[in-house]
Amino acid sequence: MANPDLLKSSSAFAERATQLSRHSTPYRDPVARIHWERLSHDAFWLPQQAVSLYGIEEYEALPLPMRQALSHHEFARFLSAGIWLESVFLQRLARAALKGPRATRIYHIHELREEAGHSLMFLEFFERAGLPDSATDARFDPWLTWLGRRLPFRSTLFWSAILLGEEIPDRLNRYVRLHAQGVCPVAVELSVLHSTDEARHIAYGQEILRHRLERAGGMTKRLLGYALSQLLRRFVATFYYPPQDLYIRAGLPDEPWAARAARHALRRQFVDHCLGPTVSRLRELGLTIGWP
């Protein structure tokens, strides 16, 4: 997502916005593109390696239906976090779309439509899967919510946070896309459609950040790198490490599953694998990112 006020000085951004708008046309409703009849509860909704407890002995000893149920709850939480994050972005983006160059306003309205379509797609999934509110209504990081609503709209930190918020879940979507064997086809379709649209949003956000950093001094970059390192940890905790109550709601025995996932080496390696390209790209822009 991009701030039109930041782009007035550069026609290149307007040209890029026009190009991306063409790729967003014609709009195709993602809800209508999903083959909902292929939704199944007798399958994993995440690749097994993407489940937070994968490789932990006590988890691997659980019955298959219980392990599948955990993947259902983790995928539902992942989608719920996407709705939460998109709702924050949509609030700010809707106001931004009222001003600025016409080309960027048009593109941002395309973004609004696509992000709203993603949330509708996720909610339709919850409805068709018969998931109760307890599985999909979750509270997420209030500090990230506050920042998303309160950071100055023109600030580099705001747009950097948006870029992280899009890239971090997108990396999991891409993993699902590339490791679809044995995964419920509808879960794969959701990940593919979401990732396809987000690729445009992420590319545009990367250009904005690069443009802003070209004019930034060394101290600004160091401070931004530190702030993004903290944001990265919070986004990772939100999207990759479920809270303890999720494991209990999924039907697992009452054991310290969240603590086991947090200290499990395979989980850390999985997260590092997913986020490696994002961290490398930020470092290439001259930012010092404290990860892992």
Image (cartoon, rainbow, N blue to C red):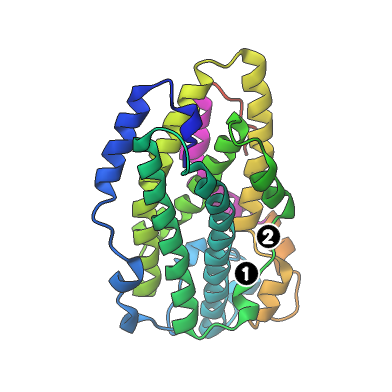
Q: Residues within 10 Å of mark 2 (few under 14, many from 20)?
A: some
Amino acid at the residue labelled 1: Glu
Residue 11, percent across and down? 34, 23
Name the image quarter holding residue 233. top right
Q: On the rendered structure, is 157 left or right of 189?
A: right
For residue 140, the mark is 2
Q: Compared with residue 14, is residue 274 higher up or lower down, i.e. above or below?
A: below
**Separation of residues labelled 1 and 2 (CA atoms):** 29 Å
Identify the image quadrant of the C terminus.
Answer: top right
- Who's the residue at 59% across and 74% down the image? 136
Q: Residue furthest front?
A: 98
> How far from the left and from the top, in percent, is residue 64?
51, 82
Toward which corner of the image does residue 150 lie, by quadrant?
A: top right
Label 1 sits on residue:
57
- Of tags 1 and 2, the one toward the viewer is 2
Q: Quadrant of residue 115?
A: bottom left
- Amino acid type shown at disc 2: Phe
Residue 158 at x, y = what percent?
60, 37
Compared with 146, 84 (above or below) is below
Label 1 SS:
helix
Check the image and report above or below for 53 versus 156.
below
Front residue of 15 and 282: 15
Residue at point 47%, 25% (across, down): 210
Task: Write down the region rendered in magenta.
Answer: 264-284
